[in-house]
Image: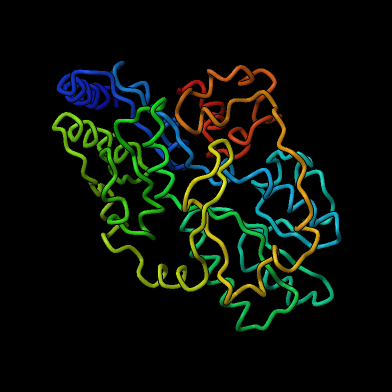
């Protein structure tokens, strides 16, 4: 493996030399964040190439308001179903993990089964994610409609990946040169959706070998002055994406402006339930969700700057001190796919 690493380093150094200047690359996928940190890939990069972790973890970018709303529902007697990685995400009202009566699930289908077998309870699925999760959620709502479930609804904070890439490209302080694009998202959306970005991008899989070859392709594009998108994950990604999944998403959800934690308002950055499925929209079902929300809290962490690529996790003054995976202060330390958690869990490799 040592010889292979040296060969990879030689290739990357040669490409970086052709670029002839410092380069700032960003991955925008939590699975990439973890894989890169675990494999120590940053240690193989030339000193002139900086690989940053962007807003690729859906748990990390879920809004404080979303968590506060879910907590309000629990406290009002609603049975709220969540995946376990949302339990420790901070909000002005605390964390969901501090509440009683939560239904922790491992698959979305569990929510429908629970709602069907407990008709006396109002059951809300508090869901976050990018397009792959959005696809599953659209199927879930269509199934609930066919089952005529009167006691089921969804509180969602789904994110639209392409608009946030445009948002990041407009940040002059971040000044990115290229994207390592998310393979899981592209498997649903297709590769064509990333065309037209002002900087080059390479869609990558998740093995260390595939990530390294994608970084090499990205440096080659930058060296040659091209701004195209290369699909380096053809086993799972095609130009048009998963057509059936996209049809279902379009039928159930529509894109809207939305807040990403740490980034602010991203035009077209969220998905909301269409009016045709509004009976399953928790925001329209429960009056408690229309009440004013508590103000956001300044915890002193710099998650926003980490998500924008302005700093690396160790540059946050709380990292590894008061903010650890055992006691997270910011959302980036909660999920193992968060940038800070990926660094922390793999700090010897990083």
From this view, report whether residue 70 is shown above or below residue 24: below
Q: Position of residue 342 (x, y in %)?
A: 52, 32
Pick the quarter of the image with the C terminus. Answer: top left
Name the foreground residue: 198 vs 335.
Answer: 198
Q: Residue at x 41, y 53 (%)?
A: 185
Q: Quadrant of residue 94?
A: top right
Is residue 23 rendered to the left or right of residue 17? right
Screen quadrant of the N terminus: top left
What residue lies at 47% left-to-right and 42% top-to-bottom?
56
Picture quadrant of residue 112: bottom right
Rendering coords of residue 133 (x, y %): 52, 59
Q: Position of residue 209 (x, y in %)?
A: 30, 37
- 253 or 215, which lies in front? 253
Residue 232 image position (x, y, % from top left): 25, 47
Q: Residue at x 42, y 41 (%)?
A: 167
Question: Which sits in the foreground, 54 or 171?
Answer: 171
How many numbered discs sit on the rendered protein? Answer: 0
Q: Is residue 163 left or right of residue 337?
A: left
Residue sitting at 73 percent across and 70 percent down? 114
State the image quarter where residue 102 is shown: bottom right
Q: Is residue 82 left or right of residue 261?
A: right
């Amino acid at each position: 493996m040592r010889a292979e690493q040296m060969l990879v380093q030689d290739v990357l150094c040669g490409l970086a030399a052709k670029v002839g200047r410092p380069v700032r690359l960003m991955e925008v996928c939590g699975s990439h964040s973890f894989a890169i940190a675990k494999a120590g890939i940053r240690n193989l990069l030339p000193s002139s190439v900086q690989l940053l972790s962007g807003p690729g973890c859906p748990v990390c970018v879920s809004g404080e308001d979303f968590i506060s709303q879910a907590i309000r529902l629990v406290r009002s007697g609603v049975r709220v179903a969540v995946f376990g990685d949302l339990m420790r995400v901070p909000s002005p009202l605390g964390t969901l993990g501090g509440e009683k009566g939560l239904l922790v699930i491992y698959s979305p289908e569990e929510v429908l089964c629970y709602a069907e077998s407990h008709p006396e309870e109002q059951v809300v699925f508090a869901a976050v994610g990018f397009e792959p999760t959005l696809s599953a959620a659209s199927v879930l709502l269509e199934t609930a409609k066919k089952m005529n479930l009167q006691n089921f609804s969804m509180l969602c904070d789904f994110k639209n990946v392409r608009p946030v890439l445009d948002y990041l490209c407009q940040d002059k302080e971040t000044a990115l040169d290229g994207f390592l694009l998310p393979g899981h998202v592209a498997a649903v959306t297709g590769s064509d959706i990333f065309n037209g970005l002002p900087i080059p991008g390479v869609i990558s899989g998740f093995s260390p070998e595939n990530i390294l070859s994608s970084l090499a392709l990205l440096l080659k594009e930058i060296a040659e002055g091209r701004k195209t998108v290369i699909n380096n994950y053809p086993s799972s990604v095609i130009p048009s994406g998963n057509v059936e999944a996209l049809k279902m998403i379009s039928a159930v959800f529509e894109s809207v402006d939305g807040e990403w934690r740490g980034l602010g308002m991203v035009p077209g950055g969220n998905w909301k339930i269409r009016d045709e499925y509004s009976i399953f929209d928790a925001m329209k079902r429960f009056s408690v969700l229309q009440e004013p929300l508590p103000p956001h809290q300044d915890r002193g962490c710099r998650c926003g700057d980490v998500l924008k690529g302005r700093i690396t996790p160790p540059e946050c003054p709380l990292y590894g001190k008061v903010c650890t995976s055992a006691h997270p202060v910011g959302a980036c330390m909660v999920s193992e796919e968060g940038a800070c958690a990926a660094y922390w869990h793999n700090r010897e490799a990083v």
